[in-house]
Structures are given as C-alpha cells and as structure tokens.
Image (spheres, rainbow, N blue to C red):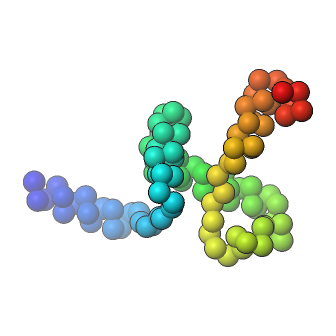
Amino acid sequence: MAGKTQYKNTWQKENVDRVNLTMPKGRKDEIKAHAEAQGESVNGFINRAIDNQISQDRRKGPQDAPESTKGQGVVSLPSEREKAQETAQNDGKTGDEQ
C-alpha cells in the first residue's frame, strides 16, 4: 500500500498546485452545499468560480477591477441580490417585476 501512496503523492507533486484558502466561519459549509447542489466537488466549484472570474475580468480589463481587490487574488462570489436577480432572469422576469 505504501507504493500506491508514494505514487499518488509523487503524481500530485508533479501535476497539481495546492492553495491554502481561508474564509469566514460557516462559508465552507455554504460553498459545500452549493457545490453539491450543482453536482460537483468543492474543489471543482472553486476552480470553476476562479475560471469564471478570470474570464469576466479579462473581458472587463484590469482598469475596471474594484480598487479593494486589485492584486489580491480575491474571487467574488455572487451576492444575495445577484442570486435573486439571476433567479428572476431564469424565471423570465426582471428584478423590478418581482
């Protein structure tokens, strides 16, 4: 069994980067529940969120990034308002029609 563990550790060291992520208490449970609802792992969800944010930032350009997050590598998750707007749009309504 040690050979399998050693192989896995070597493969990970050569093929993936690890990031230690901190967040406010309770946020991890929220992210886990959301990821599960989407049928993905927490790692998959975080990577997808990062990819989406990078794509969005590239479309906007660096000059449009909020001053408080420039250079900090902050990933913005949707606010409750944004979630409500998205839900309304998915229902064929605008935020004003609710």
Instruction: Determine which quarter of the picture holds residue 74.
Output: bottom right
Q: At 47% from the left edge and 64% from the top edge, which residue is drawn? A: 21
- On screen, residue 54 above or below 80: below
- Whether residue 10 is visible, yes or no, is yes
- On screen, residue 45 above or below 38: below
Residue 33 location in percent, x, y? 48, 39
- Whether residue 51 is visible, yes or no, is no
Residue 17 location in percent, x, y? 43, 66
Q: At 84% from the left edge and 27% from the top edge, which residue is drawn? A: 98
- On screen, residue 23 above or below 68: above
Residue 20 location in percent, x, y? 43, 67
Give the farthest residue toward the right.
96
Give the farthest residue toward the top.
91
Q: At 66% from the left edge and 57% from the top edge, which residue is drawn? A: 76
Residue 89 location in percent, x, y? 80, 30
Give the farthest residue toward the left.
1
- On screen, residue 37 above or below 82: above
* Horizontal arrangement in the rendering, residue 56 relative to residue 47 (left or right): right
If the image is split into quadrants, where does the N terminus sit?
Answer: bottom left
Q: At 70% from the left edge and 40% from the top edge, which residue is drawn? A: 83
Give the farthest residue toward the bottom.
71
Total of numbered circles in the picture? Answer: 0
Front-most of 72 and 50? 72
